[in-house]
Amino acid sequence: MEQESRRKRGKRPPMASKRGDRPAEEVQPAPPDKKKPRGRLRRRWLLNTLAVTLVVVSIAVSAFSLAMYSYYSSTIMATLESKAQTAAGMFRNYTETTYLSTARQFVNQFEEKTTIEVQILNANGRVLMSSMMDISGASAHSPDVAYAIGEKRVRPFVGTDPDTGDYVISASAPVVYNGTVVGVVRLVTSMRLVQEQMLRIVLVTSAIGLAILVVMGMIASYFIRSVLDPVIRVTETAKRIAAGSYGVTMEKRSDDEMGELVESINDMSMKIDQAERTQSEFISSVSHELRTPLTAINGWAETLYNGEVRDATDVKKGMGIIVSEAQRLTRMVEELLEFSRMETGRFNLSVEPIDILAELEDAVYTYREFFRRKGLELIYTECEEELPIISGDPERLRQVFCNLLDNADKHGGSGGRVEVSVGRDGDEVAIRIRDHGPGVPEEELPFIKYKFYKGSSKARGSGIGLAVCDEIVNSHNGTLEIMNAPGGGCAATIRLPIGVESV
């Protein structure tokens, strides 16, 4: 059974660089590219805003003008209709033969005859008298006159007068005696005054709409500038980062979404810069680590090949160095291959039920003689209880044990001894490997398992061993803890879940 490992993603640690940490460079807006037109988004945004505002203002002005026109027309019409009805009713109080004299008196004394024409018509629609001019004998063919005579009711009219061609509002009320129409009272006013008033209203409302349009343009321009200027700064910064200027940052000028975007760009820039330096440092470190054993192998191989060493003891010593350095090269290449598999998602496990105690004892047995030759004591505390079978990849877990023992030698060998213990802790198996060296600086502990991180350690290595171990343990649904032990030294604790279904 194979299981695809989980790729870890996290915040990269600060690296100890030989070049020193470069201070973050605050970005300055780059000069505009003369080959590309600038401000197209600004113009489009401004034009769209003004277009929408213009449409809204136009609709508002038109609706207001129509409402005012309707109000004036209906008011005038109602007034004329009321006055005509009142006059016709007043004439009914007189005899059929004497109402004309009363009508003439009414026409002459009508107070609004400068704006409203009063006409007295007979039953045939001929004008008997008028307040505006002497048009006696003329016929009135307006629809309201015919309606008043035929239907004996008041009828208003708005439109072009058939007789004069003027655009008017009129109202005709019949004068009825004994059920017979003997005359008509007609009030007429020209719409010219209304049109002039409407023109003034339209001009005023248009001026107000234009002022609103100008104000909206100014507000939109300010708003667009407040949004686009930071976008332009972010764009220029992104271009500089894409061109290789890693580490540049921008000043955060607000706490809104744009401020969050600036923070994200700054964080991205710093991480890219850090990754670039980490990559360069990794290449330099790996090159150095590869060069050292290769130099030793090449030197001793040439010496032995040329026959410069004839003593059997020296020959054996040289061959031992070649074998030891070749093994170190092999381990380093294996770590790099593991790292490559992790990065490309090809890191697989061959899971099977395993005896974790036997796998650990194999690793301890392998390193005990190696430690003894270096004068380092390896103390293994055997587990008194029988541990249950767990699910895991024996080769990968043995790789973790060997890597941690190798780290205990490289970083804590000065302490003189390494302690290994194993036991059950609840539903987990806990394996502890501790050295008695100088330990890890507290500020470096949170980053010690990150890829390429070597911190202030001078020990040789690629800086990816612990990252590979952490990936393997996590793939087994376990945890790897690195911490400073009480009394000095560093302790690594591996916790693996118990049960064949754990992975």
Image (cartoon, helix red, strand yellow):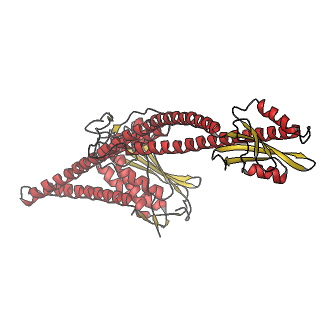
What percent of the width, then of the height, locates residue 401?
Answer: 41, 55
Where residue 485 sits in the image (x, y, percent)? 45, 40
Left or right of 479, for residue 20: left
Visible residue check, residue 489:
no
| Residue 175 quadrant | top right
Residue drawn 43% across and 42% down?
A: 264
Which quadrant holds residue 350? bottom left
Say if residue 22 shows up in the picture.
yes
- The answer to which of 324 and 366 lies nearer the viewer is 324
Q: Residue 101 at x, y = what percent?
A: 84, 35
* 55 sits left or right of 275 in the view: right
Taking the view exactly as shown, the residue that stands out farthest to the right is: 178
- How many numbered marks, from 0 up? 0
Observer-nearest of 319 and 397: 397
Image height of 492 relative to 477, above or below: above
Q: Residue shown at 20%/56% (left/top)?
A: 320
Front-lying residue, 501 or 50: 50
Query: Where residue 429 sits in the image (x, y, percent)?
Result: 53, 55
Q: Quadrant of residue 47?
A: top left
209 versus 349 height, above or below: above
Q: Is residue 194 left or right of residue 283?
A: right
